[in-house]
Amino acid sequence: MARGPNPLILLGLASVSFIAFATIVRKREQSAPASLRFQDPPPPEDKPQHTSAVFDHTKVTVLFVLGGPGAGKGTQCANLVSDFGFCHLSAGDLLRAEQHREGSQFGELIQTCIKEGTIVPMEVTVKLLENAMRAALQEGRTREGWAEGRGRFLIDGFPRKMDQAMKFDDDVCQASMVLFFSTTEEVMLERLLERGKTSGREDDNVESIKKRFTTYKETTMPVIKHYEALGKVAEIDSSPSVEEVHLKAKAVVEKILADKK
Ligand code: UDP
Ligand code: MG
C-alpha cells in the first residue's frame, strides 16, 4: 500500500530550507556597507507633506559652508559648533572615513578622486550625509535647536557641484543659506601648505592643490552663483585672523537663525 511522505523527513526538509533562507538574508544584510545602508523611510508624520525631502527644512536647519580649499571652512565651523550647537558634517571627512572603512566598495574610487581633486559621484556623498544627519537627529542632542525633531547642521565642503546641490535640496533637506568663506588663492595655498606639514592628507601637496583650485573655479563657483541668484549666500572675507573671521561669521549665523524663527 502506498504511504504518504514520512512526516519526520518533511520536518527535516522544512528546517533545512528555513536555515538556508535565514543565512542568505543575514549575508545580504552584512554585505551592505554599514554607513551606506539604505535606511527605512522615516514614519509618515516626520515627512513633510509639501516636498519629497527626507528632512523637513522648517525643523532641520542646514547651512552649506563653501569656499576654496584652505579658505578656513573647517576652522570656522568648529567655532560655530561651540557658539550655536550645530552638528558639523564635513563631506571630505565623511568621504575619507568611508575610504578607510573596511569592506567599503568605494575606497579606491574615493582615494582617486581626492588625490586628483575631482568630485566623487554624488550618490555616495549625498547618502553619507543623509545617514550622518539621521544619526545626529536620533542621538537625542540637548543643546538649543535640537528639541522636538529639530536640528541644525553645518554641511562643510558641500555641495561642490550643481548635481549634488539639486539632489540634496530635493531629496534630503532644503538648505537655508550658504556661508561662503572667500579669500585669495595665495592665502589658500599658503594655508594648505602649512597644514600639509602635519595633516597627513594625500591632497595637501602643490600638485593636488592646483587641481583642487581648478575644480573649485570650474565646478563649485557655479554652485555659489546659483545660490546667490536665490539670495541665499552670505559671503565672509576669510583673509583676516581666525578670531576676526569668527566674529563676522558668528554675527551672520546669529541673524540667519533669528530670521528662521
Ligand atoms: N570631495 C568630493 N565631494 C564633496 C566634498 C569633497 O568629492 O562633496 C572630495 C574632493 O575630491 C575634494 C576632497 O574630497 O577635493 C577634499 O575635500 P575637503 O572638503 O576635505 O577639502 P577642503 O576644502 O576642506 O580643503
Ligand atoms: Mg575642510
Image (cartoon, helix red, strand yellow):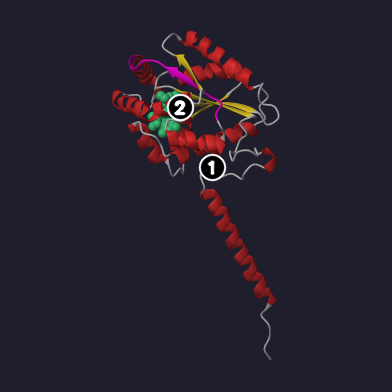
Q: What's the amino acid at mark 2? A: Gly
Sequence-earlier tag: 1 or 2: 1
Helix, strand or loop under label 2: loop
Residue 234 lies in the magenta stretch: no
Can you see residue 27? Answer: yes
Quickly name the residue at label 1: 34
Image coordinates of residue 162 in percent, x first then y, are: 43, 34
Q: Position of residue 122 (x, y in %)?
A: 45, 38
Q: CA distance from mark 1 to mark 2?
A: 23 Å
Residue linked to disc 2: 157
Q: From the image, which quarter does the N terminus lie in?
A: bottom right
For the residue pair 62 and 2, the one nearer the viewer reads as 62
Looking at the rendering, the stretch of residues picked out in magenta corresponds to 175-186
Q: What residue is rendered at 47% in x and 30% in y? A: 91
Q: In the image, what residue type sits under mark 1? A: Ala
Please give the count of numbered marks on the rendered protein: 2
Q: Is residue 72 visible?
A: no
CB of residue at label 2: within 8 Å of ligand 1?
yes
The quadrant the C terminus occupies is top right
| Residue found farthest to the left | 207
Q: Nearer the viewer, residue 250 or 141?
A: 250
Could you say where residue 260 lies in the image, as x and y percent from the top left?
63, 22
Few, some or many residues within 10 Å of mark 1 (<14, 14–19, 20+) = some
Q: Relative to the observer, which residue lies in front, 235 or 74?
A: 235
Q: Secondary structure at mark 1?
A: helix
The extreme front residue here reads: 229
Where residue 55 sits: x, y (%)? 61, 35
Relative to residue 56, is residue 256 depicted above or below? above
- Mark 2: give few (<14), some (14-19) or many (20+) Cα within 10 Å: many
Disc number for residue 47: none
- In this rendering, the label closer to the viewer, 1 or 2: 2
Magenta stretch holds residue 180: yes
